[in-house]
Amino acid sequence: VQLVESGGGLVQAGGSLKLSCAASGGFFSRYTMGWFRQAPGKEREFVTTISRSGSTYYADSVKGRFTISRDNAKNTVYLQMNSLKPEDTAVYYCAADFTISTTTWTTVGSMYDYWGQGTQITVSS
């Protein structure tokens, strides 16, 4: 499975961006999908995840501001980011976890099998 993120860029605090992650080379609907991010000098951190059936989970830091969704027909997962803050500045990665379960998700990066190359989000104050 190959994952390609798009939609990153520079935005002012309080603004919005929508990331997309297009998957190819596999059965997209069989993967739990996740978004992670890594800020300069920091470790990669979990942002959000969506199960095969569409159930979602968010890190506390983005809850209420970010929304993950998936379109299995388009083999794409999205991350709508609203009310962006300077501390959201990071490289954002999408990831895919092949799983038999349709309802479970994971926040653990090492559980994901495939990763995209990342897209930079910079939020100016």
Image: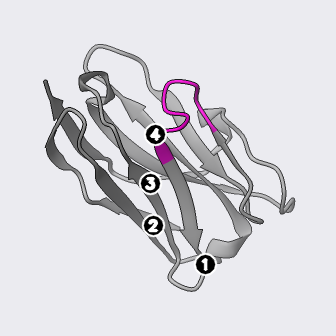
Q: Earlier in the sequence, mark 3 or mark 4?
A: 4
Q: Nearer the viewer, mark 4 or mark 1?
A: 4
Tag 2's secondary structure? strand
Q: Which residue is mark 2?
A: 2
Mark 1 crowd level (few <14, some 14–19, many ≥20, 10 Å Cα): some
Looking at the picture, how far across and down is residue 90, in whole percent?
29, 31
Mark 4 crowd level (few <14, some 14–19, many ≥20, 10 Å Cα): some
Looking at numbered disc 3 in the image, what kind of residue is underneath it?
Answer: Leu
| Residue 72 horizontal side relative to residue 37, left or right | right
Q: Which residue is mark 1?
A: 72
Residue 84: in magenta span: no
The quarter holding residue 30 reads: bottom right
The quarter holding residue 71 reads: bottom right
Q: Earlier in the sequence, mark 3 or mark 1?
A: 1
What's the mark number on residue 65? 4
- How far apart are labels 3 and 2 at the CA level? 18 Å
| Residue 92 horizontal side relative to residue 100, left or right | left
Looking at the picture, how far across and down is residue 108, in whole percent?
66, 32
Q: Give the residues drawn in magenta, as a range.
A: 58-66
Q: Nearer the viewer, mark 1 or mark 2?
A: 1
| Residue 78 horizontal side relative to residue 41, left or right | right
| Residue 89 horizontal side relative to residue 72, left or right | left
Tag 4's secondary structure? loop
Q: Which residue extends farthest top?
A: 41
- How far apart are labels 3 and 1 at the CA level? 15 Å
Mark 2 crowd level (few <14, some 14–19, many ≥20, 10 Å Cα): some
Looking at numbered disc 1 in the image, what kind of residue is underneath it?
Answer: Asn
For the point 31% across and 24% down, which residue is it? 39
Looking at the picture, how far across and down is residue 47, in whole percent?
51, 36
Q: Nearer the viewer, mark 3 or mark 2?
A: 3
Name the residue nearer the viewer: 14 or 87.
14
Is 114 drawn above or below residue 92 in the view shown?
Answer: below
